Amino acid sequence: MRKPAIFMTAVMLLAASSALRAQSASDIAGWIGLMTTPVGGLGPSIVVPAADGSALAWRANGHYAHWQFAPDDDNTTTLAVGVSIPMSRGYVTFDVGRSTVKQCSECNAFMVGVEMDVPLTGLSEADSDPTFGIGLEPSLGYMKETSSYADLSALALGVSLPLTMTVPAGAARVVPFVSPGVGFGLLSGGNDSESGERVMLGGGVAMAAGKLQVTAGARKIFIQDGPTLYGVSLSVGL
C-alpha cells in the first residue's frame, strides 16, 4: 500500500463518512475517483433509437445527479451539460460539470468526461413489438477540486454493458434498462496517489419522443455502506 497521506486527504477534503473510513485506502480511492467524475458521478444513460429508424443526429444534454450518505453527511449535487456526436454506430458524448457539497465548500469540484455509447444490437430497429438490446459504454473522466485550499484530483475509467428493452408507445419509445459495469479510479493529492477498482450497477427508464429524450436512473458503485446516486438527464436533438 502506498503512503497513507492520500487516504487522509480524501477523508478530510471530501468529508467521507465513517462508513468509508472503515475501508482500505485502495477501496476509498477507487470509489471516490469514480463517484466524483462523470464516469460514476452522473446518472446512467443509454442510446434510444428513433421510432422511425432514422439516422442519429447531434444532441445537447443536461444532467442532474445527487447522492449522500445521510441527511447531514456528504450532500452532493452535480450539474453538467454536454454534447453527443453521432458515429457510424451510436454516439461519443463530451460532458462538463460541477459538483457541490453542501457541508464542505472546499470539496466543490469541476469535472469533465467522455463516453462512447455503442449499441451492439437494436440501433436501427423500428418495430411495433418490444425489442431487446445490448450496448457497450466505455468512459473516461477527470475531476479537480476548485478551492484554492484543496489539492485533490481524480481520474477514472469505466466500462458498462447496458441491457435494454425498447417498448413502442405510439410516437414515443419507453426503454427500461439495467447497466452492469466495472471501473477504475485514481485519486491524487500532494505528492501521493492511490487507486482501486470497483464494481458498478446502473439502471433506470428512458423515454424518447421526436427530438426529446428524458432518462431517470440510479447508479451504485459498490463499497460497504456506500450511497446510491440518483440522476435525471434531458437530451435534445439538434
Image: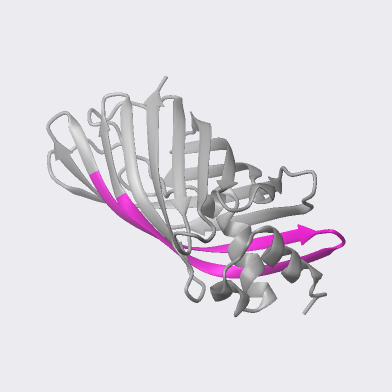
Can residue 89 be seen here? no
Nearer to us in this view, 174 or 56: 174
Q: Characterize the magenta stretch by its predominant secondary structure.
A: strand
Percent position of residue 107, x then y:
66, 51
Q: Is residue 98 above or below residue 69?
A: above
Nearer to us in this view, 9 or 62: 9
Residue shown at 47%/36% (left/top)? Answer: 91
Q: In which quarter of the image is the N terminus?
A: bottom right
Q: Does the magenta stretch include residue 183?
A: yes
Q: In this view, does 21 lie above or below 58?
A: below
Q: Which image quadrant is residue 220 in?
A: bottom left
Residue shown at 50%/46% (left/top)? Answer: 77
Percent position of residue 57, x then y:
41, 25
Residue shown at 44%/27% (left/top)? Answer: 59
The segment highlighted magenta reads: 175-204
Specify the farthest residue to the right: 191
Residue shown at 52%/54% (left/top)? Answer: 40
Q: In this view, does 200 lie above or below 2?
A: above
Percent position of residue 132, x then y:
25, 52
174 left or right, relative to 203: left
192 left or right, relative to 21: right
81 left or right, relative to 149: left
